[in-house]
Image (spheres, helix red, strand yellow):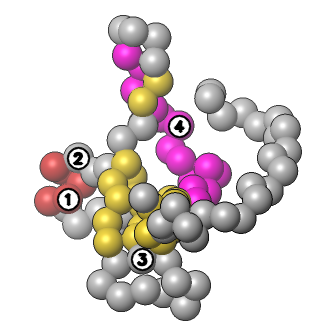
Amino acid sequence: MIRISIDLSKIDKQKIKHHVNGGKYYDMIISELQQPDNYGNTHTLYESQTAADRESSKPKNYLGKGKAITAQANTQTPAATENIDDDLPF
């Protein structure tokens, strides 16, 4: 398992795809870092790019980082979630 934290304010809402089944989808990529960062994160998450974006060397939109966890390491009590009133469509 990999636990990832995403900065929702960085999501480009125009790239949310509306499917005929009523679902809303946002394509992302999880990539392993070459070495862990100062916080022990081993993976990064960024917005999927089009072929044109990659060919033009457009910078990636990084959304967050995370680390591999085991079931034994996941013993922390989850933090209380706030009911944040934002304008995200999900």
Residue at mark 4: 13
The quadrant in which the N terminus is found is: bottom left
Residue at mark 1: 54
The type of residue carrying mark 2 is Thr
Q: Give the foreground label among 4 and 3.
A: 3
For residue 19, what is the image quadrant? top left
- Residue 64 spot, x, y in % from top left: 52, 63
Q: Residue at x 44, y 61 (%)?
A: 2
Residue at mark 2: 50
Residue at mark 3: 42
Circles 1 and 2: CB atoms closer than 8 Å: yes
The type of residue carrying mark 1 is Arg
Circles 1 and 4: CB atoms closer than 8 Å: no
Task: Name the N-terminal-most of marks 3 and 1.
Answer: 3
The type of residue carrying mark 4 is Lys
Task: Specify few, some or many for label 2: CA neighbours under 10 Å numbering under 14, 14-19, or 20 or more.
Answer: few
**Is residue 25 visible in the rendered structure shown here?**
yes
Q: Is residue 20 above or below residue 47?
A: above
- Give the Cα separation between the discs numbered 4 and 3: 27 Å
Q: Residue at x 34, y 78 (%)?
A: 33
Q: Is residue 27 above or below residue 59?
A: above
- Give the Cα separation between the discs numbered 2 and 4: 16 Å
User: In screen coordinates, is 34 left or right of 21?
Assistant: left
- Magenta part of the chain: 5-19
Q: Is residue 12 magenta?
A: yes
Task: State the SS at label 2.
Answer: loop
The quadrant in which the C terminus is found is: top right
- Residue 89 spot, x, y in % from top left: 62, 27
